[in-house]
Amino acid sequence: MDWTYLLIVTVKVIVVVVGLLGGFAYMTLVERKVIGRFQLRIGPNQAGPYALLQPIADAIKAVFKEEIIVTHANKVVYMLAPAISVGFALAAFAVIPFGPDIHLFGRTIPLQIADVNIGLLYILAMGGLGTYGLILGGWSSGSNFSLLGAFRTTAQIISYELPMGIFVASVVLGAGTLRLSGFVEAARPWYMWIWLWLSFPFYFTVMLAETNRSPFDLPETENELISGFQTEYGGIKFALFFMAEYINMITASAVMTTVFFGGWRGPFVAQWPLLGVVYFTIKTFILLLLFLWVRASFPRLRYDQLMSFAWKLMLPVSLIYLAITACLVVLV
Amino acid sequence: MELVLFIVFGLLALIGAFGVLISQKPVHSALFLLLNFVMLGFLYLVLGAQFLAASQLIVYAGAIVVLFLFVIMLIGSDTVGDFVAKGRTLSRYLSIILGVLFLAGVGYAVGARAFPPAAGAPDFGTTEAAGKVLFTQFLVPFELVSILLLVAMIGAIVLAHGVWPAPSRRPRE
C-alpha cells in the first residue's frame, strides 16, 4: 500500500462527501423554489440574491435549536438512528463513477472512490442497511405516530425491494457486469438501449418508493402521522434524517444516470476528461428535477394502494421484464 | 493490515454475538444480531469473498433482521420480554450440550486444517466465479435448495391462512 494512493483516495472521499452535502443543501433550495413555481408561488426569496443563502440560514437554525430528547425515548437508539441513516446514505455513493480517468502528474486517477466487483449489489446492501435508521428512529421515539411510521417504512421498503432487485438483475443481465464503470462502458446495439429505457419508468417508480419520496412518502405522511418516524426529532437530528433522504435521492439519480444514461459519457469527453463530470452532474440533476416534478404532480397514495401496486403490478412486470431480457441476451 | 481488520471485525462480531444473548430487551438483541451480521459480511470481504459479503449484507442484515424487528415491534416488546425471561430449563441444558459439541467440531476442523486455504484463483469470490460454480458444479444442490425454500414459503402461507373461506363473498377492497 503506497501512501500517495491512500492520499488520493482520501481526497476523493472528501470531495465526494463535500459535494454530496453541498448538493443536499442546495437541493432543498431548488426543491422549494421549483415546487413554489409549480404551485404558482415564488418560494424562498429573502436570504441573499435568489435566496442563495437560505440553506446556510437553515443549517444555522438547525444547529442552534434547543435539543429536545423525549422522555419516552430509548436514548441510545434514538441518538444512533439519524447517524445510521446518514452514514449508509453517504457510503452508498462510493462505487459510483462520476467521471472518466484523469491523468495528473503521470498518474491515472479514476474518478470513482472504489470500483468494486459487486458494484450494484453494494448499493442495494447500503440501501437496505440505511433503512434501519428510519425503523429505529420510529421505534425509539416511544410515540405511536413514530411507531406507525416505522411499520410503514419496513413494509414499504421490503415490498419494493423485490421489484427493484429484479429490475437490477435485468439491467445486469443486459450489461453483463455488476461494476458501475462497466455500465458506463457497456456497448449495446440500439434495440438493447430501447429495451433498457423501456424499464426506466418502472425502475424510477420503484426508486421513488425506496427513497420515500412523494407519492410514496407514506412513512412521513404529514396529515395522518404528523411526520411519521421523525415526529419526535428536532434540530440537527431532524436535519440529519432530512439529509439522508436527499442524499439517497442524489445517489438514486446518480445510479440511474450510470445504469440507464451512460453516466459521464457525452461529446468531447475524450479531449477534456473533466467535461465528463459536468455531463454526469447535469444528467443527475435532470433526474432529480424529475423527482420534484413527480412530487408536484401526484397526490399521495393510500396505504393499500401502495401495497397492491407493489405486489400486483410492479412485481409481475419486473418478472416478465427479466424473462424477456434473458431471452434477448441469449438469442439476439 | 488484513490481520488488524480481521481482529477489529472479529471482536465486534463477538461483541454482537454476546450482546444478543445478554441484552434484556428483544429489540436490543435484534440490533446486536444486526451488528454481528454486518461484521460477518465485512469479514467475508477481508477474506476476498465479495459476492458472499454482498449477499450477507443484503439478505441477512438488510432483510431478515428487518423482519425480526418488524415482528418484535408488532407484538410489542413487553410481551416478548416475558416470553424470553421464562425460558425453559430443558432447552437451556440442551443448548449448552450442542454448543460444546459445535465448539469441539470447529476446534477439530481448525486444528486439523480441514479447510483449504482461501483465495486460490485470481477471480476467487467474485460474482462471476460464484455463479459459475453454483450453476455447474453444484447445480443439483442449488436447485434442490430453491425448491426447499419454495416449499417452505407455500407451507408458511397455508399455515398462516388457516381455513380457506368459501369463495361466495369476497371482502370489499
Image (tube, helix red, strand yellow):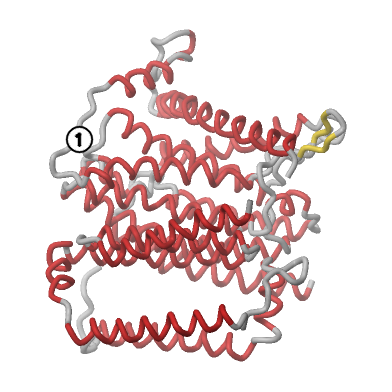
Residue A282 in sight from this viewpoint: no
The residue tagged with tag 1: helix, strand or loop?
Answer: loop
The quarter of the picture where the N terminus of chain A appears is top right
| Residue in the picture at 33% in, 61% down | A155
**Does B115 appear above or below A56?**
below
Q: Quadrant of residue B85?
A: bottom left
Q: Which residue is mark 1?
A: A69
Q: x and y percent of residue A40 in the render?
A: 39, 23
Q: x and y percent of residue B117 in the render?
A: 68, 74
Q: Quadrant of residue A38?
A: top left
Q: Quadrant of residue B3?
A: bottom right
Q: Chain of mark 1?
A: A
- Other-residue count near label 1 (Cα within 10 Å), few / some / many at <14 / 14–19 / ≥20: some
Residue B148 in sight from this viewpoint: yes
Frontmost residue, A296 versus A107: A107
Q: Is residue A160 left or right of residue B52?
A: left
Frontmost residue, A113 versus A222: A113
The quarter of the picture where the C terminus of chain A appears is bottom right
Q: x and y percent of residue B17 in the render?
A: 37, 65
> What residue type is disc 1 on?
Ile
